[in-house]
Amino acid sequence: MSEPVMSLQNLTRKFDTRGGEITAVDNVSFDLNKGDILCLVGESGSGKTTVARMAAGMLKPTSGSVIFEGQDINTMSKGDFHRYRKAVQIIHQDPYASLNPVHTIGDILRAPLLHHKLVKGRREATQRAGELLELVDLHPVANFIDKYPHQLSGGQRQRVSVARAMTLNPRVIIADEAVSMVDVSIRVSLLNTMLKLRNELGVTFLFITHDLAVVKYFAWEGNVGVMYVGKLIEHGRTPQLIGRSLHPYTRALAAAIPEADPDLTRSKEKLQLRSLDIPNLNNLPGGCVFHPRCPYWEPGLCDTKPPPLVDVGGNREVACHVAVRDIQNGGDGRNLIPTEEKVRPRAAD
């Protein structure tokens, strides 16, 4: 197997807060291969955006490494890091805040081309800017290149953000909730534009989202990593992870994906969590951090021992004591006994 384009190894990031030190990302590792799509999924506070910022070189990890083409980005020379930042671009969540309101769309796209001397002059920069607008389906170009961001819709602004990310011919694009603030009606069109970049130009994507339905559409041929309060709790190929989730948290997320077919909706697993409250990072529960919400947790195990991320075969990893034990006993990792049945007292004979 070829060397990954990017490898995140045991990334941990801690922050000091008024309530004490918190661990926003806890020992997260995964690889990004050329042309691959990896989606990081999780609720607010799961640490997925912090991972993205460390991968983009915008935030240094407390410990662990981000390896790009065999080099740790945090020990690179200034010149190597400069080349890294050109090769790895980010698309931000908010298209209303990420574009300079006093610059035209043409200025926004010409600036990186001229700064990095990728073109010979303003005329060539304008020509390349037009090509980028065509690439992201903003045409005719004359209708957009001289406009200001406030004159465009949210979806059009986000397409400009995608075009700007492509100005430096990146190898990796980190998309942080890139479609969450645009109308649902144009979300699929934006996802298709990014898929075109991957399929035609070989761009690798690290895609951050809270929406497993978006993952199902965008990364069906890719991978998914599920995060929960800073930990990577399940990782695998998208069809297997969504269709046969192993971790109870992932199963709950998959069960919540809306389906157009009512028969599919009726046949989907109904998984009732014990609580909807996310743990406070200043006061995390002992053992598995998900056990206060888990319908399958086992007293004396899940509340005392943190589960490691275990390779269970088939390019799957999961951090769940009961699912891993079921697999080791010959099961599929999903035939789990609800906690209430484990602790229910037996009827007298």
Image (cartoon, grey):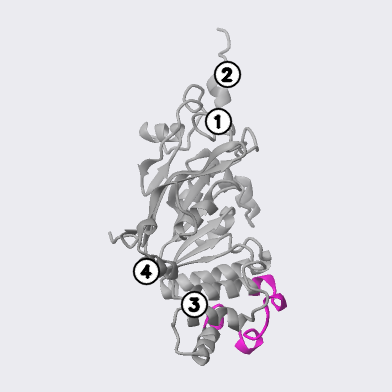
Is 329 a magenta residue?
A: no
Alpha carbon separation for disc pair 4 and 3:
19 Å
Q: In the displayed image of the protein, which residue is found farthest to the bottom?
A: 123
Circle 1 packing at 10 Å, graded few (<14), some (14-19), many (20+), is some
Residue plotted at (59% across, 83% down): 106
Residue plotted at (49% across, 59% down): 58
- Mark drawn on residue 285: 1
Which of the two discs, 1 and 2, sits closer to the camera? 1
Residue 318 in the image, given as x and y percentages of width and height: 43, 41
**Placement of 157 over or under 146, stated as above or below:** above
Alpha carbon separation for disc pair 2 and 4:
64 Å
- Mark drawn on residue 79: 4
In this picture, residue 108 sits left or right of residue 82: right
Label 3: state its secondary structure.
Answer: loop
Alpha carbon separation for disc pair 1 and 2:
24 Å
Tag 2: amino acid: Arg
Which mark sits nearer the N-terminus, 4 or 3? 4
Residue 186 in the image, given as x and y percentages of width and height: 65, 69
Tag 4: amino acid: Gly
The residue that mark 3 highlights is 167
Label 4: state its secondary structure.
Answer: helix
Tag 3: amino acid: Thr
Residue 307 visible: yes
The residue that mark 2 highlights is 344
Residue plotted at (44% across, 59% down): 222
Tag 1: amino acid: Pro
Circle 3 packing at 10 Å, graded few (<14), some (14-19), many (20+), is many
Range of the magenta residues?
Answer: 132-156
